[in-house]
Amino acid sequence: MSTEPETFPDHFSDVASAYAAHRPHYPAELFAWLASIPPGRALALDTGTGSGQAALGLAAHFDRVVATDASAEQVAHAVRHPRITYKVALAHATGMEPGSVDLVTAATAAHWFDHAAFHAEVSRVLRPRGVLAVWSYGYAHISPDVDRVLQAIFEHVAPFWPIERSHIDSGYRDLPFPFADLDDAPKFLCRMNWTADQMLAYLGTWSAVRQARKALDSDPLVEHASALQAAWGDSPREVVWPLMMRVGRME
């Protein structure tokens, strides 16, 4: 019998392998900074871990990382590491011991959560002076000509985003957050060197693209692929995503 939670907004189980292969990686500097601010480095909890991109970064700095996701398919495709324990669990029902966690994170995930329940769980599991950090990335930037094509793709699929996606559009500024934001949080960037085909594979993991394919009986990426290829060229290009973060401390 499956241990997967029965009710959660499941936008990625059906593309779990593609999600693991084609999402950008977070910068190492992000995890070094996050590890510098909690009261210790014994235990980090990564919620909504997906395929474990953030958990892997945390494992370089913490003795132990517990990484949870509501999707059994996502967890099955997560990157394994000796210091990471993966669990199929909702973000607000982690099963962690009270007051046991130094750092709780949610990477490109918090906008999908039941915020009140998640914050209650964070308050339960964090140690005194423990830290909650949630982040996501905004629009990718490559060059003006490529960015115009990406904007056209975004506008094509915009009606098909789930309502929770609005938190990303607002830069997480209106995301419910239980603690006072740390004023000195640095700005971080995700950077990848990708071809146009790699960008199209990433766009194919967007929930709005998959919903548009079903609703329109056509593929918006196919319709824009030639324009993207022409603007991109044959060589890899640097793709940059600005990270938007909320970081706060349990007092």
Image (cartoon, rainbow, N blue to C red):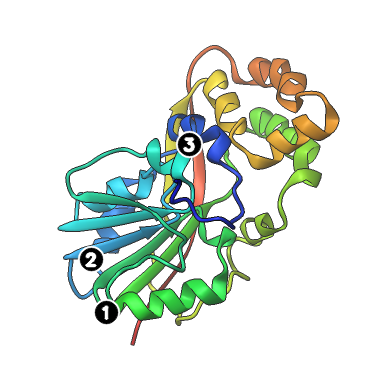
Query: Is disc 2 in contact with disc 3, using a CB cutoff of under 8 Å?
Result: no
Mark 1 vs mark 3, CA separation in Å: 32 Å
Which residue is label 2 attached to? 36
Q: Is residue 187 above or below residue 128?
A: above
Mark 2 vs mark 3, CA separation in Å: 26 Å
Residue 6 image point, x, y percent: 56, 55
**Front disc: 1 or 3:** 1
* Mark with earlier residue (1, 3): 3
- Could you say which is closer to the camera, residue 188 or residue 160? 160
Which residue is label 1 attached to? 99
Sort mark 2 into few (<14), some (14-19) or many (20+) by Cα contacts within 10 Å. Answer: few
Residue 164 image-quadrant placement: bottom right
Mark 1 vs mark 2, CA separation in Å: 19 Å
Q: Identity of the amino acid at label 2? A: Ser
Residue drawn 61% across and 45% down? 11
SS state under label 3: loop
Q: Identity of the amino acid at label 3? A: Arg
SS state under label 1: loop
Residue 171 image-quadrant placement: bottom right
Please identify the quadrant where the C terminus is shown: bottom left
